[in-house]
């Protein structure tokens, strides 16, 4: 084997052009696959970094009466305690929640940080060892201990060892720091993305205890020897018992037990695996290219192989020699592929959509290197397989017959042609997929939003502390009282922002079109309806100030907008969108109708005074949802947690004559003038938010486009190589044709027509394959079908043009053959 590898290396040194093309082809395929594998591994395959990670499961609640079976939700604390007490198959039960943002004060300027709630034993069970201090201990929840991350410790406290015991005010509540969590710890998020942890109190009488709102996450471990199906069966039985015991809250509430790794991945696999399959096509095309090059070399060596066979070399021995050619090419291909993968990962980090799972963990680690080595070796073997199978069939008599003219046998020529046709087919599939993705992205870009995002600045706010909200007595944790300071702050902010030079309009809203967050769903009771609350249909809710619609230039269809005259003491009113009218008043006029929002105990009936045009709320792929808009001056004082964000975490929208006015510093000063402990954060233009919503489609189109471009280059190289070899192989025949009076156009057509027939066969196969493969993209397309005829025709014409171009250059070379020289070769 060593001798074969040495001989293969020497043979390739004798043909550096062929070796360079083969190595480049393999490097492109291996580099693209390594980059994609690194992404898939970081996002989907990376093992959980916890002890007994293979036994960790998540326990979700499900709505048994929902037609959507993939409707997993969180857990309530009361259900969790019942599951834990009655389960015999699971152990080490824990809960966590949060993951959003809170405002930390008391240490320098107010800062927006990320947080998580955890049960006291969770971090210890996941193998966390504090950098300094200690972890939570059961029974100390009422003392409000807190853990902070190493990154926050270094950023805010300068890595002071004396941070232990210090007080930190978070959303108006005072916590005591007891430890620092080392960098790298993650719990359903990027490493070190969480800054602050506090405890979930599951003791009797705690404010955390409730059975209504399943918003926390529950986790446990399978006991040794227990299967997932056994745990699922047991928990389903417990859920059925709870439904009978608590019909008001648990009647249609089921349970789903899911491995934590699967729960962490979510639906990301449906996005990444098709891309991984696409990049696999690139490697396959590269292998076909190299196989054709090696087939050409095998043809040139047919006399040598025949002599070896005549001297006693077995077919297995000859096959090993051909396979060694592939392995020798694979080694530099792997090295060059790793260099390309390094650049590819850097490129991915630069263009990855914000919040892409695992983006910060994509690297050339040991699994990626192992994959590269395996992919490279496999590519080398696959590339050499056809030459080995064909070239090892030595026939001395046939070789002497072919040697008279130096032309390849028909069978070998058909094999090379078939490989190139397959290469074109694979390129066709990739190009169609890329064309559909690009077509969708362009349609998304040109889709009418229904509002004007230009020159609109969006800033997020969070009103924290007892000045703005207080806990409702003897109610569950998600109930708050809105204090008068909320209205005073809103008035101050809008008044001062409106005086900034260049500002046209300003408004506050609970939700911004295509912006951060989402509108809460609210049940709608139409006047005179006798349906129970559980049977009522839902709409989205948005608490806004009077200038919201003007700031975004949203058209009014009927009636009027909300105004500053819609105050607490007046008649309560609402504005709805056209989707709301279609849902609740089909065929009728909604203006003047009375509805009630099931959103709190003091909610009053509201008269619909206006209908606005539908606009894109989240992404253009989603049809407009029914939405109701209420004035921030007409809200109940007592607000459930579902609607708290509408008042305590509003978004400021400012339209100006010039983009970027007002500056973030200007808004921050206006806010600080009212309350120095309030923070603004995430100040962006609305156009940036719109671009972020379109980032996944852009990423998908770019990735498929890049892979398709590589495949196209490789396919062009393959066609050119085959045509170039065909001209060399038919050198004598072309000389005879020229000597008999064939014109140059006839010679060009002789070569090009053969390439066109070959390309046509590949295109037919590619179209059939694309019709099947593009169905995987259906969920990611917008405004275009997987079988879009325009895309198929465009790609077919483009590939055909590339094939003709790749044929013309060798054809032009054939026209300058000297007939005398060609005949002498006989």
Image (cartoon, grey):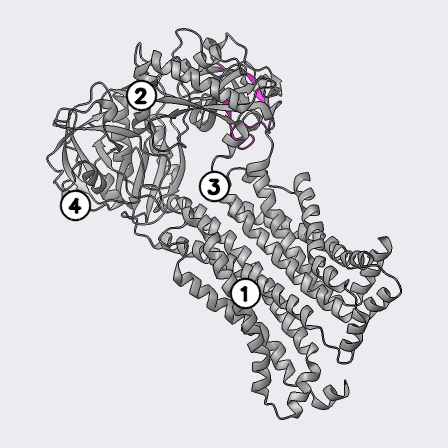
Q: Residue at x 51, y 34 (%)?
A: 265
- In magenta stretch: residue 333: no
- According to the picture, the residue beneath numbered tag 3 turns out to be 354
- According to the picture, the residue beneath numbered tag 1 turns out to be 762
Q: CA distance from mark 2 to mark 4?
A: 36 Å
Going from N to C along the chain, the mark reached first, 2 or 1, is 2
Find out whether the residues at labels 1 and 4 contact each other: C-beta distance under 8 Å: no
Q: CA distance from mark 3 to mark 1?
A: 39 Å
- According to the picture, the residue beneath numbered tag 4 turns out to be 557
Q: Residue at x 69, y 58 (%)?
A: 383
Find out whether the residues at labels 2 and 4 contact each other: C-beta distance under 8 Å: no
Residue lying at the far left in this picture: please name it: 592
Q: CA distance from mark 4 to mark 3?
A: 36 Å
Q: Nearer the viewer, residue 262 or 555?
A: 262
State the SS at label 1: helix
From the viewer's perspective, tell me whether residue 483 is left or right of residue 465. left
Q: Position of residue 561 (x, y in %)?
A: 17, 39
Disc 3 versus disc 2: nearer the observer: 3
> Taking 314 as reference, is 750 above or below it?
below
Find out whether the residues at labels 2 and 1 contact each other: C-beta distance under 8 Å: no
Q: Classify 10 Å Cα crowding around label 1: few (below 14), some (14-19), many (20 and above).
A: many
Residue numbers of the magenta segment: 176-196
């Amino acid at each position: 084997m060593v001798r074969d590898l040495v001989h293969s290396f020497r043979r390739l040194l004798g043909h550096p052009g062929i070796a360079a093309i083969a190595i480049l082809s393999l490097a492109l395929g291996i580099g693209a696959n390594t980059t994609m594998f690194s992404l898939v591994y970081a996002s989907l395959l990376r093992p959980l970094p916890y002890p007994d990670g293979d036994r960790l499961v998540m326990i979700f609640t499900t709505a048994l009466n929902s037609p959507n079976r993939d409707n997993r939700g969180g857990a309530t604390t009361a259900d969790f305690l019942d599951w834990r007490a009655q389960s015999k198959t699971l152990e080490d039960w824990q809960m966590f929640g949060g993951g959003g943002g809170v405002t930390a004060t008391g240490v320098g300027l107010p800062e927006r940080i990320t947080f998580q709630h955890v049960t006291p034993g969770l971090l210890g069970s996941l193998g966390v060892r504090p950098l300094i201090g200690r972890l939570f201990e059961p029974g100390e929840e009422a003392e409000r201990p807190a853990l902070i991350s190493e990154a926050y410790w270094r950023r805010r406290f300068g890595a002071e060892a004396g941070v232990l015991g210090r007080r930190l005010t978070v959303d108006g509540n005072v916590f005591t720091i007891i430890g620092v969590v080392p960098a790298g710890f993650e719990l359903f998020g990027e490493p070190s993305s969480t800054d602050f942890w506090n405890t979930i109190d599951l003791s009797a009488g705690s404010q955390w205890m409730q059975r209504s709102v399943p918003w926390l996450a529950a986790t446990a471990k399978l006991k040794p020897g227990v299967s997932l199906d056994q745990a699922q069966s047991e928990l389903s039985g417990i859920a059925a018992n709870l439904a009978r015991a608590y019909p008001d809250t648990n009647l249609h509430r089921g349970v789903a037990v899911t491995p934590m790794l699967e729960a962490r991945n979510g639906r990301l696999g449906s996005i990444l695996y098709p891309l991984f399959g696409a990049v696999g096509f690139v490697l396959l095309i590269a292998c076909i290219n190299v196989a054709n090059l090696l087939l050409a070399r095998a043809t040139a060596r047919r006399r040598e192989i025949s002599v070896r066979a005549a001297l006693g070399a077995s077919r297995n021995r000859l096959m090993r020699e051909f396979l060694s050619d592939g392995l020798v090419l694979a080694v530099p291909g792997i090295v060059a592929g790793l260099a390309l993968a390094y650049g590819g990962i850097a490129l991915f980090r630069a263009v990855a959509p914000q919040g892409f799972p695992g983006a910060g963990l994509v690297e050339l680690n040991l699994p990626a290197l192992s994959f590269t080595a395996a992919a490279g070796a496999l590519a080398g073997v696959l590339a050499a397989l056809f030459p080995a199978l064909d070239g090892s069939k030595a026939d001395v008599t046939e070789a002497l017959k072919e040697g008279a003219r130096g032309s390849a046998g028909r069978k070998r020529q058909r094999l090379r042609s078939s490989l190139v046709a397959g290469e074109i087919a694979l390129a066709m599939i990739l190009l169609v997929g890329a064309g559909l993705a690009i077509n969708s992205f362009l349609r998304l870009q040109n889709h009418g939003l229904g509002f004007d995002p230009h020159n609109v600045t969006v800033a997020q706010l969070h009103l924290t502390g007892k000045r703005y909200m207080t806990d409702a007595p003897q109610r569950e944790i998600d109930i708050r009282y809105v204090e008068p300071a909320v209205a005073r702050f809103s008035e101050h902010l809008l008044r001062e922002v409106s005086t900034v030079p260049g500002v046209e309009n300003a408004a506050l809203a609970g939700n911004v079109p295509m912006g951060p967050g989402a509108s809460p769903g609210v049940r709608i009771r139409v006047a005179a309806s006798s349906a129970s609350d559980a049977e009522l249909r839902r709409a989205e809710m948005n608490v806004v100030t009077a200038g919201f619609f003007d700031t975004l230039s949203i058209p009014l269809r009927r009636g009027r907008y909300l105004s500053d005259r819609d105050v607490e003491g007046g008649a309560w009113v609402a504005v709805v969108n056209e989707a709301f009218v279609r849902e609740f008043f089909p065929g009728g006029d909604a203006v003047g109708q009375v509805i009630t929002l099931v959103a709190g105990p003091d909610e009053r009936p509201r008269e619909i005074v206006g209908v606005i045009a539908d606009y894109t709320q989240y992404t253009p792929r989603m049809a407009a949802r029914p939405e109701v808009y209420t004035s921030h001056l007409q809200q109940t004082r007592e607000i459930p947690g579902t609607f708290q964000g509408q008042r305590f975490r509003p978004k400021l929208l400012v339209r100006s004559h010039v983009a970027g006015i007002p500056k973030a510093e200007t808004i921050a000063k206006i806010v600080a003038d009212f309350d120095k402990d309030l923070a603004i954060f995430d100040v962006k233009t609305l156009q940036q938010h719109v671009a972020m919503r379109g980032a996944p489609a852009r990423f998908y189109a770019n990735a498929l486009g890049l892979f398709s471009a590589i495949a196209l280059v490789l396919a062009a190289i393959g066609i050119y190589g085959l045509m170039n070899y065909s001209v060399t192989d038919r050198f004598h025949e072309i000389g005879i044709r020229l000597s008999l009076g064939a014109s140059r156009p006839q010679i060009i057509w002789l070569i090009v027509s053969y390439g066109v027939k070959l390309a046509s066969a590949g295109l037919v196969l590619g179209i059939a394959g694309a019709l099947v493969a593009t169905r995987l993209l259906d969920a990611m397309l917008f405004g275009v079908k997987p079988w879009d005829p325009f895309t198929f025709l465009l790609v077919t014409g483009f590939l055909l043009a590339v094939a003709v171009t790749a044929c013309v250059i060798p054809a032009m070379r054939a026209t300058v053959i000297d007939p005398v020289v060609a005949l002498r070769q006989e």
